[in-house]
Amino acid sequence: MLDTPHPTPHAPTTDCFALARALSGVNFIGGRYVPAASGKTFPVVNPATGAEVATAAYGEAADVDAAVQDAARAQKEWAKMPARKRGALVHACAAILKEHQDELGHLIALETGKALRTESRVEAGVVADIFEFFGGLGSELKGESVPFAPNVLSVTVREPLGVVGAIIPWNVPMLLMALKVAPALVAGNTVVVKSAEEAPLAVMRICELMNRVLPPGCFNIISGFGPECGAPLVMHPKVRKVTFTGSVETGKIVAKAASEKLVPVTLELGGKSPMIVFADCDFEKTVAGALTSMRFTRQGQSCTAASRIYVERPIFDEFVSRMKAAVNGMVMGDPLDEKTDIGTIISQGQFEKVQGFIEEGRATPGATAHECSAMPSDPALKKGLFLRPVIFTGLDASSRLVREEIFGPVTVIQPFDDPEAVLAAANDSEYGLAASLWTNNLKVGLDLAHRLEAGLVQINQNLVVQANLSYGGVKSSGLGKEASLEAMLEHFTHKKTIMVNMA
Ligand code: NAI
Ligand code: MG
């Protein structure tokens, strides 16, 4: 239970502006809101207007230490609680999050610019689902009995690791946080989250909502920047597990720091996910599938975005023109407007990075940039970070747009002539997160599914991460898995062997 009066409303609210102000300037540590030890804050900006809507506490090493110490104290009692009871509490959190789905949708739309109807409210629903799923897994924290000798009982038991340090990005912050916090808690760990500097509010509200049910100190959250706040969290001696989602570059820094302490690390990093379309596909379904695969409603800010689309030559032209028409039909506008399909890019820096890719593509000889959809006309949005989706043709594997993660509404469509060639092209990447194949020839589809270098391959669909399916990349896309029972057991517990000699 919260032990202090808190500034945020108890009941769900969709007045996200007021809620953002109420959440200003605080971290959530040990069951209560506290400002940063230094008193410093940084602005939180609505990317649809450029207006400052809140401040966030500027967390640094002292705040990290306070949170980790509280989490370490809480962990001792939390781990003693029967696993099913922990699960029941996490399940109760899911119920509260469901009641606040619309509220969280509005808040995340405000701070990230993701459209409420197509993305933000959906994300909030998935978050509740993730806590509900893991809340039911308490009694699955089972060990084995090992046939050692007749008079020796030899068993393994699953034990929590201790305090988990979780670092999350801004693209789907609530969902990516839930994938870490839910299994970590159910397994008997306590957690300190470092939120992304661009999106600290909705995850803070989630932490507060869950602390209405969880004992204080089990789930703490600090807002702050990477080197000042993320790095001390990774390095803290009492953090016994690090889980990170973000860029490859930062993932390597995090893994290196964690290796100094020899603590396990899970990394969910970037992607350059291929979508492979065969001429025999269900054409209409596949065009629609390309829009969802590319995550255009999230402005392409997704690690699994289908940012390389390979289309078999006989249907190439028709596919490009139908896809253009479909993206043209998507409405760009105010993220909080129910009519909006596509909102804004998260930040000025990210906006410029994506524009740089687009300019480079345009300047490439032979390339065509098909700009789709239309800029919003509302003058209130004139400072918003709106970027028209771009479909490129005429680029090949020599282009940085085909090789690097853009993390924006930009995809490249290339023709192919045979399955072996497209397989080689798809696998010619530093990344290996996800891939999709669109064909009615399951013989070819399954063969390629087995040979694609990716953690997740889908045929004739391209869903986002699911709570009960193991998820994670190969190559530079990451280390370890998230979601699913398997990930909870392998990444948030260790196996202890106990032997009893009864002779
Ligand atoms: P980033 O990887 O730098 O940031 C992710 C998280 O790591 C943030 O919370 C950040 O504060 C933290 N961080 C940064 N430096 C750190 C350090 N030294 N120690 C500990 N934590 C640290 O990603 P950023 O700068 O927001 O975006 C850059 C690019 O990364 C994007 O353009 C995109 O290509 C990729 N990206 C991929 C994501 C994914 O889901 N795989 C998510 C976000 C970004
Ligand atoms: Mg960075």
Image (spheres, grey):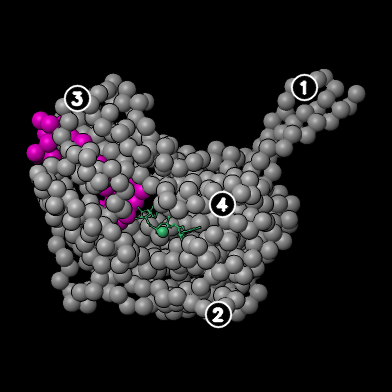
Whether disc 2's CB lies below 8 Å from ligand 1 is answered: no
Q: Are marks 4 and 3 in contact (CB under 8 Å)?
A: no
On the rendering, which quadrant does ligand 1 occupy?
bottom left
Mark linked to residue 345 = none
The answer to whether 168 appears left or right of 381 in the picture is right
Amino acid identity at mark 4: Ala
Badge 3 marks a residue whose secondary structure is: loop
- 338 drawn magenta: no
Q: Is ligand 1 closer than 8 angstroms to the Cβ of mark 4?
A: yes
For disc 3, the marked residue is 418
1 or 4: tag closer to the N-terminus: 1
| Residue in the foreground of this view, choosing between 438 and 405 | 405
Helix, strand or loop at disc 4?
helix
Q: Nearer the viewer, mark 3 or mark 1?
A: 3
Amino acid type of the residue tagged 1 in the rendering: Phe
Amino acid bearing label 3: Asp
Q: Which residue is mark 4?
A: 257
Image height of 476 relative to 116, above or below:
above
Task: Give the number of the disc on residue 39.
Answer: 2
Query: Would you call the spot at circle 2 few (<14 residues within 10 Å), some (14-19), or many (20 or more)?
Result: few
- Dot 3 or dot 2, earlier in sequence: 2
